Image (cartoon, helix red, strand yellow):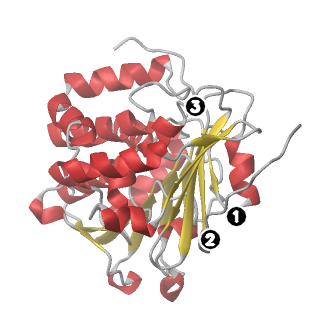
């Protein structure tokens, strides 16, 4: 492939230290963030396959189950578990986890164990002993691909598929502003290595159940654009129960809310059954920084895509304005 200007550079010494920590470990846990998306799942699987090929005992974890869109990616032997005990491992690798709260497991029982933090979120506070955090990266899958190149490891067909799905998802099908010439070259390289585009398209965009269509119809029908230019949508437990769906069926919905005409940014708030509010914020405008909005709500993420979570419930109210 033609060499292009890099959007960011991984320090070879840092990559070497990470590989050294991997080589010294025999049991490794790879953790994806809570409510894992295709980038978190894809980077986990690609890294897991590499480490298993090196003779390591490797397990994948996430507090929540991977979404249905990722089911075809995950081999039967590589299921994600939510029951995690750090004392069973001598190395932990967190992928796509912007903070320890996103890791969602208690790691305090073994603080002496090495922790490698691989991520691309602006809000990441470098919580690992080794931090490969690059906010300029489109996705954690992109970082994993670059690490494989630095470590001089071949990319298999299954790894290429997992990484391309992660990139495809986190760039909004290459429509977001985090797409660079270098990234398109990486995507091309993954296709040349056999990435299964049919599986990616089928998993991400051709797997809607009738119930999911009805849920999305309810939510999109509730969208309102405020005077401040916020396109707002809410998902209540009733929405989910009425259509017999689950939280996994809301993935990608925020991107459609963001298409609202005359909006500056989109805000989608989901009320979960356990009395927790989870919000997603997106923008298409360069002058809007939704990361700053998320920060005020205790969240984090990127300038164009961020989120937050805190305990609470929602109550619908109607306001009337009288003019003359």
Which of the marked residues, 3 or 1, is nearer the chain's N terminus? 3
The residue identified by callout 3 is 8
Q: Tell me whether circle 3 and circle 2 mark residues in contact (CB < 8 Å).
A: no
**Residue 12 location, x and y as percent?**
51, 40
| Label placed on residue 298 | 1
Is residue 71 visible in the rendered image? The answer is yes
**Residue name at image x 23 percent, y 65 percent:** 56
The image quadrant that residue 158 belongs to is top left
Question: Residue at horizontal 15%, vertical 49%?
Answer: 72
Closer to us: 85 or 111: 85
Disc 2 from disc 1: Cα separation: 8 Å
Quadrant in the picture for the N terminus: top left
* Image position, residue 250 (x, y; %): 39, 52
Secondary-structure class at tag 3: loop
Mark 2–mark 1 CB contact (< 8 Å): yes
In the depicted view, which residue is nearer to us: 245 or 162? 245
Disc 2 target residue:
310
Of label 2 and label 1, which has the lower sequence position? 1
**Closer to viewer: mark 3 or mark 1:** 1
Q: Nearer the viewer, residue 49 or 64?
A: 64
- SS under mark 2: strand
Q: Compared to 85, does 209 lie above or below?
A: above
């Amino acid at each position: 492939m033609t060499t292009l200007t890099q959007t960011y550079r991984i320090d070879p010494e840092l990559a070497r230290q990470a590989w050294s920590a991997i080589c010294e470990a025999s049991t490794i846990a790879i953790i994806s963030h809570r409510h894992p998306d295709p980038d978190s799942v894809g980077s986990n699987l690609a890294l897991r396959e590499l480490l298993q090929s090196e003779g390591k005992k490797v397990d994948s974890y996430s507090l929540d189950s991977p979404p249905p869109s990722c089911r075809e990616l995950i081999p039967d032997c590589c299921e994600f578990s939510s029951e995690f005990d750090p004392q069973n491992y001598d190395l932990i690798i967190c992928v796509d986890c912007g903070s320890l709260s996103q890791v969602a497991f208690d790691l305090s029982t073994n603080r002496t164990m090495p922790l490698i933090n691989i991520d691309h979120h602006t809000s990441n506070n470098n919580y690992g002993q080794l931090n490969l955090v690059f906010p300029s990266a489109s996705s954690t899958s992109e970082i994993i691909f670059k690490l494989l190149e630095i470590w001089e490891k071949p990319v298999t067909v299954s790894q290429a598929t997992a990484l391309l799905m992660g990139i495809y998802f986190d760039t909004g099908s290459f429509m977001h502003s985090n797409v660079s010439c270098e990234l398109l070259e990486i995507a091309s390289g993954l296709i040349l290595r056999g990435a299964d585009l049919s599986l990616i398209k089928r998993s991400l965009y051709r797997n809607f159940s009738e119930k999911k269509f009805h849920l999305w119809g309810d939510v999109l029908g509730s969208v309102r654009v405020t005077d401040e230019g916020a396109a707002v949508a809410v998902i209540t437990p009733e929405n989910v129960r009425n259509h017999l769906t689950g939280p996994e069926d809301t993935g990608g919905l925020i991107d459609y809310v963001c298409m609202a005409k005359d909006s500056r940014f989109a805000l989608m708030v989901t009320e979960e059954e356990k009395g927790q509010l989870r919000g997603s914020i997106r923008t298409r405008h360069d002058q809007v920084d939704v990361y700053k909005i998320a920060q005020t709500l205790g969240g984090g993420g990127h300038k164009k895509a961020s989120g937050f979570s805190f305990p609470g419930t929602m109550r619908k109210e109607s306001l009337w304005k009288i003019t003359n």
